[in-house]
């Protein structure tokens, strides 16, 4: 298999020979999660989840992975599966009760609390990780609140409100109401810089990525040339922005500070599965960047695969096999016990 690379520039940080740790993917049609060796892509375990698992979030210490059980189209989900990553086992299930369609998630610093969006509630929930109790419900002031990003200090979150062409800026530590900012149509993929000052937002309808100043509440740049900028990941070191594009079958990397393109990885269109969300495409969808900023991991929904990308060299390091319709993805620096 051959990967087409358009390599425009390389980052200055040191190269890594290979990643380490564990990658966790959700498999929407199988109602499972797959754990893979981040060094080789070898499958380590396939674990049951709830119906229609969508997104994955990993604790800062790497011990736990959350999988949001969004549910099939006619059966809204209301649970979150908790995975013990080193043990390669499901630890428990958090039942959110009347809360429906949990989706985007993130652990807050200290890992005692996590946040999760609820489309039906039009809100972001702060949940106690220890007992699954909902601590606070913060209205997003938007419809179809889907994905979210959280600042490194855990004080600010942003959400993409698909139905309203807005994003919301939420104060997780205080009592201020959500501020909404107008963006392009059908915003879905979103990521927030570590300092909370910049949000990158993908528009499914207008095929652009907007860079938003969250303090001023204004769009400061528009990045073009996408088919469907579905998911966005920002590295913790502030160097790299990564955008997956299932319509074009590629992933594009940018300098997060200047917004200049760095490279594009176009995935092979072979071994496609009948359930490819975008017919004829490997459909790169979920994306996560390792904390050291050296590696990205991307689900290929149209091939039931995951790819590891060396961000210094702009090329694929390995492919691994997932379950059917791989979607959300998380990374832990811890190795799963064999």
Image (tube, grey):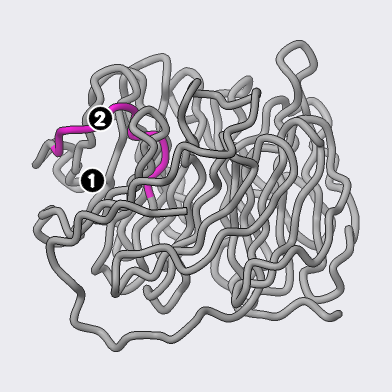
Relative to residue 246, is residue 73 depicted above or below?
above
The answer to whether residue 252 is magenta is no
Question: Residue 59 at x, y = what percent?
Answer: 64, 67
Residue tagged 1:
214
Residue tagged 2:
181
Residue that appears at 37% across and 54% down: 3
Q: Which residues are magenta?
A: 223-232
Relative to residue 210, is residue 187 depicted above or below?
above
For label 1, the SS is loop
The image quadrant where one finds the C terminus is bottom right
Q: Quadrant of residue 128?
A: bottom right
Residue that appears at 77% across and 27% down: 77
Horizontal arrangement in the rendering, residue 220 relative to residue 300 (left or right): left
Question: Residue 156 at x, y = what percent?
Answer: 39, 53
The answer to whether residue 227 is magenta is yes
Mark sitting on residue 50: none
Q: Would residue 62 be visible to someone looking at this image?
A: yes
- Looking at the image, do the residues carrying marks 2 and 1 touch, with CB atoms under 8 Å apart? yes
Relative to residue 239, is residue 244 depicted above or below?
above
Q: Residues within 10 Å of mark 1 (few under 14, many from 20)?
A: many
Farthest-out residue, front:
1
Question: Residue 14 at x, y = what percent?
Answer: 29, 88
Q: Would residue 178 be visible to someone looking at this image?
A: no
**How far apart are the alpha carbons under marks 2 and 1?**
8 Å
């Amino acid at each position: 298999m051959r990967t087409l690379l358009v390599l425009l520039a390389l980052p200055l940080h040191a190269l890594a020979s290979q990643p380490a740790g564990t990658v966790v993917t959700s498999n929407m049609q199988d109602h499972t999660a797959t754990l893979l060796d981040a060094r080789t892509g070898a499958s380590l375990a396939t674990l049951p989840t709830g119906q229609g698992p969508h997104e994955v979030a990993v604790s800062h210490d790497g011990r736990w992975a959350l999988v949001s059980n969004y549910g099939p189209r006619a059966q809204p989900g209301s649970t979150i599966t908790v995975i013990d990553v080193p043990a390669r086992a499901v630890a428990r299930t958090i039942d959110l009760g009347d809360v429906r369609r949990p989706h985007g998630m993130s652990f807050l610093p200290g890992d005692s609390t996590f946040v999760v969006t609820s489309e039906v509630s039009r809100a972001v929930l702060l949940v106690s990780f220890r007992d699954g109790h909902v601590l606070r419900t913060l209205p997003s002031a938007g419809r179809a609140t889907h994905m979210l990003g959280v600042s490194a200090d855990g004080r600010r979150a942003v959400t993409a409100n698909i139905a309203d062409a807005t994003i919301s800026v939420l104060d997780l530590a205080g009592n201020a109401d959500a501020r909404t900012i107008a963006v392009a149509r059908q915003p879905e993929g979103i990521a927030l810089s570590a300092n909370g000052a910049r949000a990158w937002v993908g528009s499914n309808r207008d095929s652009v990525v907007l860079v938003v100043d969250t303090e001023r509440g204004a769009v400061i740049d528009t990045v073009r040339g996408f088919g469907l900028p579905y998911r966005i990941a920002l590295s913790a070191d502030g160097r790299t922005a990564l955008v997956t594009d299932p319509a074009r079958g590629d992933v594009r990397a940018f300098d997060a500070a200047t917004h200049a393109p760095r490279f594009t990885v176009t995935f092979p269109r072979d071994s496609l599965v009948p359930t490819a969300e975008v017919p004829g495409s490997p459909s790169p969808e979920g994306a996560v960047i390792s904390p050291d900023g050296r590696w990205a991991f991307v689900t290929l929904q149209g091939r039931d695969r995951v790819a590891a990308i060396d961000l210094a060299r702009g090329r694929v390091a390995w492919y691994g096999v997932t379950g059917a319709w791989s979607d959300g993805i998380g990374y832990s620096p811890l190795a799963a016990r064999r």
